Amino acid sequence: MSSEAVASINDAIRKFESGEITLQQLQSIVQQNGAEISFWNPATQRHPAYPEGDNRSRAGFTYHPSHPRGRFFQSIIKKAILRAIDFAHHSITKYYDPDGFVYDDERLKRLDTFLKQYIAENFQHAYPYKSDFMQKIIDIILFLMKEDVYYRARFLDIISKLSAFDFELDQLEKENIERWH
């Protein structure tokens, strides 16, 4: 498709989104430029941006929450994960060690302070739901590091090696942080 056709289609889409032209007019312009408009039914179809075998990081869900698989993810999988995290977090201090989330190891203290400060600053828009979840995950991981040298050695090794990575956020990720910050 020529760049002229793409420009024409993009212009038509902008006009449609602003209400200047109807859907039928948009379809006509798209067809005149050798393309077609296709729609998907989120209640019955997988999101077309993520076909089978496409395992990129998502900007949206593979299955919309109105799709049976989307409902399964939202109401079964996510809830099971949240319950498991809540149970583990609560049980550590109630049944195992009341000081489970208190650290004398300076490395764990530094991680605890840094990660919790990051969560407090960057999860304000989702307080308390997502921030509490993230806090509990951090507590559980740091507890495992405190309690078991196997996990401590490996997590600290992972963290030290991660600093060798120069991860750069893509545009969508940067926009997401800006939008919710």
Image: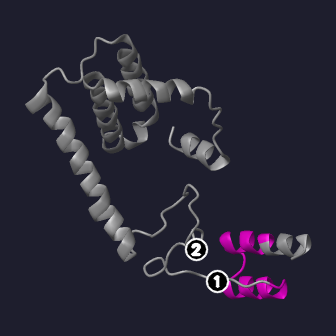
Q: Is residue 41 left or right of residue 72?
A: right
Residue drawn at (32%, 37%) of the image: 137
Give whichever of 71, 50 is nearer the camera.
50
Question: Which badge, 2 or 1, comes first in the chain's sequence?
Answer: 1
What secondary structure is found at the residue carrying circle 2? loop
What secondary structure is found at the residue carrying circle 1? loop
**Mark 2 — residue?**
48
Quadrant of the frame with the N terminus: bottom right
Is residue 175 covered in magenta? no
Secondary structure predominantly adopted by residues drawn in magenta: helix
Q: Residue 110 appears at what percent x and percent y? A: 41, 16
Give whichever of 22, 100 is nearer the camera.
100
Which of the two marks, 2 or 1, is nearer to us in this view? Answer: 2
Q: Is residue 154 left or right of residue 165?
A: left
Please name the amino acid that badge 1 sits on.
Answer: Ser
Bounds of the magenta span? 10-34
**Mark 1 — residue?**
38
Dot 1: few (<14), some (14–19), or many (≥20) neighbours within 10 Å? few
Q: Is residue 30 left or right of residue 158?
A: right
